[in-house]
Amino acid sequence: MKMFTNLKLVLSMLCLVTASVYGQFTAKGVVIDNAGDPLIGASVVVQGTTIGVTTEIDGSFSLAVPENEVVLEISFIGYETQRLSVNAASGMLTITLEDATTQLNEVVVVGYGTSRKEELTGAVSKLQSAKLEQVPLASVEQTLQGNVAGLQAVMGNGQPGANVQVRIRGIGSISASSEPLYVIDGIPVTAGDITRTNTTANTMAALNPNDIESVTVLKDAAATSIYGSRGANGVILITTKSGRTGKPKIDLRTQYGFNNWAVSEKKRLKGLTSEQYTQMFLEGWMNRGETIEKAVSRFEGYYPGAVDFGANGEIQKINVETNWIDEITRTGQTQSYDLSASGGNDFVNYYISGSYFSQGAPVIYSGLDRLSSRVNITVTPTSKLKFTNNLFASNMEQFGMSDGSFWANPLYTGYFLAPVIPLYDDQGRFYGDHKSFFMGGNNPVGSLSGDDARMFNQLRIIDNLSGEYEILKI
């Protein structure tokens, strides 16, 4: 009887062990992102419990679970949380986490920090890099027009790199500036037209729009509370791109285009031909009482050799036919080349870029050339300590004409000058040495050849070095 009792006890213990063995298993797998890179430190937890592990350096995990079938909850900062039902027959798991883009879009830069959209009460507009990249414009302010509600961005003229007047709250002053404050990566910078030798020159044109991650526009009084009187006309916060943890990423962008008159050739103002001008010249002086012979003599005194006349003053041959507007205009060209590299790991993230931008206006010797580079590096020696250095350098050359009135303006001169005036003299030089050769005016082609043209050169370097140490975990 005792032997039977002991056998029964042994069988009961075997049943318990068997139940225990078959009631748990080990879930194994690897967690990766969309690019197939392993996610280090991702959380893998049995849903509804505190049982869990974090992924290793290769993204792998091994978790002992207490039941036949459980739901694993896999999460990582910046990625969508995924829930997966697994059992002993599931085998090796490969779990791909998707980017949490909807969550990232909820964050808005405001002043010295960030805020979630549902917590934001101020008037703030944000423009992402997708609307800034590969836009054939010289400066970032031009891209804001039509993309930010309530903001006006107007160029004074069509000169490449011309200053852009930005108004967020309308005109806030009679004599002082109404321009907003520009802040690049936390540094307030000088913006607007700082030259008096050129018609207009924009300092913000030195910044490459392809290097910008986002633009945030602060419109209401909250901007003044942070930046003081300098933010009275609004604040434009510009955040440049930075590297992200993962494999190195290299981007090459090229762009080539043309620009011309905004008005078609059929609708442009047409000047007189040499024949029309000559006829009107003679008719005008004859209406004043002069004879045809006297009028022809006067014409030949002004424009020697331009026209051959007959005995009775009739036009026999046109020797000079100058279309001044055609001579000073062209089809402008725009070209852009951008090369960037970004990437990083748990220790360092980097973004490095170099670009060349060139834009020629439809008026000869009027354009913009820009060489720029950027190096943004973030180093994280420990989980609490971080160093950031954003270095930007740009060399910009802007050259163009004067838009003053009367003879200082080549377009005015081009429409006013007679077509019977030659472009070059017999020696191949610009006719009249291009200065003060007709009614105090000039040869507009000669004045735009480089002798009288105006050039603005700007070398701009901005460096922002900062360090952060987390004293308390918030």
Image (cartoon, grey):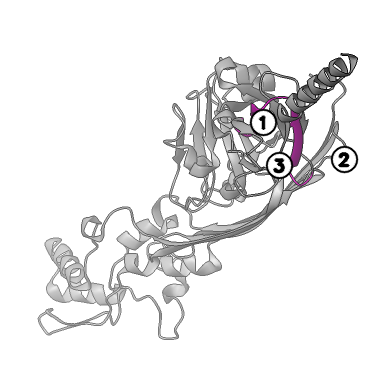
Left or right, residue 184 beside residue 326? right
Image: magenta residue range: 57-81
First in sequence: mark 3 or mark 2?
A: 3
Q: Secondary structure at mark 2?
A: loop
Spatial CA distance of label 3 from label 1 is: 10 Å
Rendered position, 237 above or below 156: above
Using the rendered image of the protein, determine whether residue 42 is visible from the camera's viewpoint.
yes
Quadrant occupied by the N terminus: top right
Give the label, 1 or 2, closer to the camera: 1
User: Disc 3 designates what residue?
Assistant: 39
Rendered position, 280 above or below 267: below
At label 2, counting other C-alpha atoms closer than 10 Å, the crowd grade (few under 14, some 14-19, many 20 or more) is few
User: Which disc, if any, is residue 75?
Assistant: 1
78 falls in the magenta region: yes
Say if mark 3 contacts mark 1, CB within 8 Å.
no
Residue at image location 59% in from the left, 47% down from the top: 196
Q: How many marks?
A: 3
Identify the image quadrant of residue 314: bottom left
First in sequence: mark 1 or mark 2?
A: 1
Amino acid type assigned to the residue bearing label 2 in the image: Pro
The x and y percentages for residue 411 are: 37, 58
The x and y percentages for residue 377 are: 77, 46
User: Disc 2 designates what residue?
Assistant: 381
